[in-house]
Amino acid sequence: MTKISDTIKTDHRELEAAYNKIISPKDQDEQVRYQNQFTWELARHSIGEELVVYPAFERHLKDGKAIADKDRDEHQVVKEQLKKFQNMKPTDPDFIPTIKALMKNLSQHMKEEEEEDLVKLETALQADESEKLSTSFGRTKAFVPSRSHPSAPTKPPFETAVGLMTAPIDHIADMFRKFPEEKISPNPSTKSS
Ligand SMILES: [Fe+2]
Ligand SMILES: [Fe+2]
């Protein structure tokens, strides 16, 4: 019985953990692995929210449309920053400033989701509805792009048609990227959440 708000919070904590490894790694190899992990996690998390969670705001909350639009706008800013960061070399002097600037926006966004948006959503949902959303969010993350493509539309059904075409390409390229060693699968698209 996992509520959607708890599933989202788990992702947020993973993003923070990867960020901390990026800004204070033990070596550059670890830094690159967590750069890839962070990118993979944030790209899938964002699109999962856009496809599953934000439409639920629109369906269940009176001011849901405004909340969803605000969150999509915030995602757009972070996606642009992620696109810049995802291909940067750690030796680039802008590497740390770029991820720090991204995280400043992302932290604020995650705080609003956790303390405001998702609180409202949970209030409007029955326990089984929240659980179903959580399952659907997890499944959706398995087939969405795992890199940032800020020019892709952020609303269904456009995102499902256009944005998702990049997913298989991202997933194949992920097989050739380094990820943190304790992660189980070398091909993250086979991971279920
Ligand atoms: Fe979000
Ligand atoms: Fe989020």
Image (cartoon, rainbow, N blue to C red):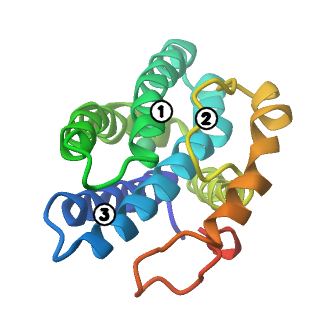
Q: What residue is shown at x 37% (from left), y 39% (from top)?
A: 119
Callout count: 3
**What x and y, as percent, mark residue 146?**
61, 53
Front of the two marks 2 and 3: 2
The mark that comes first in sequence, 1 or 2, is 1
Evaluate if marks 1 and 2 touch, with contact meaning CB atoms under 8 Å apart. Answer: yes
In the rendered image, the vertical position of residue 150 relative to residue 14, given as above or below: above
Q: Position of residue 116 (x, y in %)?
A: 32, 31
How far across and down, in percent of the image, does residue 177 sit? 54, 69
Is label 1's Cβ within 8 Å of ligand 1? Answer: no
Q: Is residue 24 above or below residue 168?
A: below
Q: In the image, what residue type sits under mark 3?
A: Ala
Ligand 2 contact, mark 3 (Cβ < 8 Å): no
Q: Nearer the viewer, residue 133 or 36?
A: 36
Q: Are marks 3 and 1 in contact (CB under 8 Å)?
A: no
Whether residue 41 sits left or right of residue 163 in the image: it is left
Whole-number angstrom distance, CA of label 2 to CA of label 3: 20 Å
- For residue 132, side relative to residue 168 (left or right): left
Residue at image point 39% right, 62% down:
10
Q: The residue under label 2 is which amino acid type?
A: His
**Which residue in the structure is indicated by mark 3?**
18
Q: Residues within 10 Å of mark 3 (few under 14, many from 20)?
A: many
Residue displayed at 48% across by 32% down? 79
